[in-house]
Amino acid sequence: MAAIRRSTALAHQLLVQSSRKILRSQKCCYGNFLPDKAYIGGAWVPASSGATFPVLNPANGIEIGIVPDMETSDVQTAITKAHTAFKTWKKTTAKERHDLLLKWYKLIMDNQEELAKLLTAEMGKPLVEAMGEIAYGASFLQWFAEEAKRCYGDVIPAPTGNKRLVVIKQPVGVAAMITPWNFPSAMITRKVGAALAAGCTTVVKPAEDTPYSALALCELADRAGIPAGVINVVTCSRKNASAVGKLLCQDPLISKLSFTGSTTTGKILLEQSAGTVKRVSMELGGNAAFIVFDSANVDLAVQGAMASKFRASGQTCVCANRLLVQSGIHDEFVDKFSKAVRKLVVGDGFDSDTTQGPLINVRAVEKVESHIDDAVSMGAKVVCGGQRHQLGGSFFQPTVMTGVSEDMLACREETFGPLAPVVKFDTEEEALAIANGTRVGLAGYFFSNDISQIWRVAEELEVGMVGINDGLISSEVAPFGGVKESGLGREGSRYGIDEYLNLKNLCFGNL
Ligand code: SIN
């Protein structure tokens, strides 16, 4: 055991040494996007207290840089700036907003590689995935640039002859956004793109682990000509996060709160928003069931499971959390799936053959371990992985477990890590009961070649999004969001902009 610990420590030390060298050269690549200031009212500003906090690379713990540790007084300034900017931004034409969003989109794509490197440095996901996230994130700006021009109202047949009813759509006002570390870029553009298109202004609090991607987006928004105060990004450490979050929920100048993160935090924010009756969108935790029926194409199901389970090392809200596999194909699926999992390459996201980066921190690793320990203590079997990776730090081996049952933690909670627990089932009814036996309902997946079963199961799953013979469901054109305790509202798609618009009924009388 001591020998294993020594070799893990050595592997980690070597990783840190080589990362320091790589970091120096990498900084030249994304150094344009490393401000040590936040972005308020179109200016780069420090915290009024002068406090800062470090941003660390999760692959090696090396400091990337420092950003302002803002308090509520700084955030109040950002809210006031956004409120002032709203007075003019709401009067811009849809075409003007379209043009600015498109310019921003193009600048992001022109800087895709640099932004992706920055994202890998602060979040850890492999560079190819980071490149994908930048393009995914930018696609929301392109999409909502178009949607800005389609905020049509309605003419409603009036109940009496001397009236005419017209419904117009208006921006809700200042929108606050609290965004997560697992998609440091795309979760900002998915919210801000919709808000700006609708005519709202914004105050964004990015996750303390990944503020640089947010600040880089501000730099490019500024270059695109988006006016001062329309986008404000306030950075703060974990220490100040709850006070800042509370202010964003309670300030009467903010009309709308959009949050992506855990269900537990979402519930707190909902309660705090009640006092000012804010519009809210909540994209919260999931516990996605990934069901493979006997009729499925097993190779396709394995491919889908790999994509859904191991995206961002299992750290997305829509990652398959529980794999339910029907008894007739269970052994074949487990065999093929575990072979594919063994081929995954864990490492620093900057290494070209890495497919699995580190988890965000050691707390995340401990959660994966606790789910494995709990399952094993109740009789589950580890087929592959199951341990911290020899690179140490927050690297964990991609893991497959069989003999899992729905009472185990790995099925009851969202693991948010590279653990695939497989539950064997016999009937469709049984699979649906397990899949729906949870208070959350974000995404669900199933693989089947039986058309009647496909419709039945798609309709029965209590989730907001269903992947049918497909493990990747997210895109800018499709509504993203959940049911039950997985959230409120939808992001992306033609529905996403509605979250930032009020309907106003104009009743023309006595005509
Ligand atoms: C999330 O994990 O919050 C977002 C995932 C996605 O957009 O696909």
Image: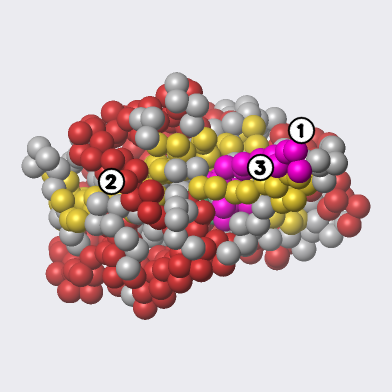
Among numbered discs 3 and 1, the one appearing first in the sequence: 1
The part of the image, by quadrant, that contains residue 212 is bottom left
Q: Secondary structure at mark 2?
A: helix
Q: Amino acid at mark 2?
A: Lys
Task: Tell which of 88 and 324 is nearer to you.
Answer: 88
Graded by Cα atoms within 10 Å as few (under 14), some (14 to 19) or many (20 or more), the crowding at tag 3 reads few
Q: Residue lying at the far bottom in this picture: please name it.
A: 110
Q: Which residues are magenta?
A: 492-511
What residue do we see at 91% from left, 52% from top? 452
Among numbered discs 2 and 1, the one appearing first in the sequence: 2
Q: Which residue is mark 1?
A: 433
Looking at the image, is 505 positioned above or below residue 88?
above
394 left or right, relative to 72: right
Q: Amino acid at mark 1?
A: Ala
Horizontal and vertical percent for residue 127? 37, 68
Estimate the spatial distance between the alpha carbons at disc 2 and disc 3, rounded to whole Å.
30 Å
Estimate the spatial distance between the alpha carbons at disc 2 and disc 1, rounded to whole Å.
50 Å
Q: Secondary structure at mark 1?
A: helix
Q: Residue lying at the far left in this picture: please name it.
A: 50
Q: Which residue is mark 3?
A: 506
Tell me the quadrant of the picture where the C terminus can be found.
top right
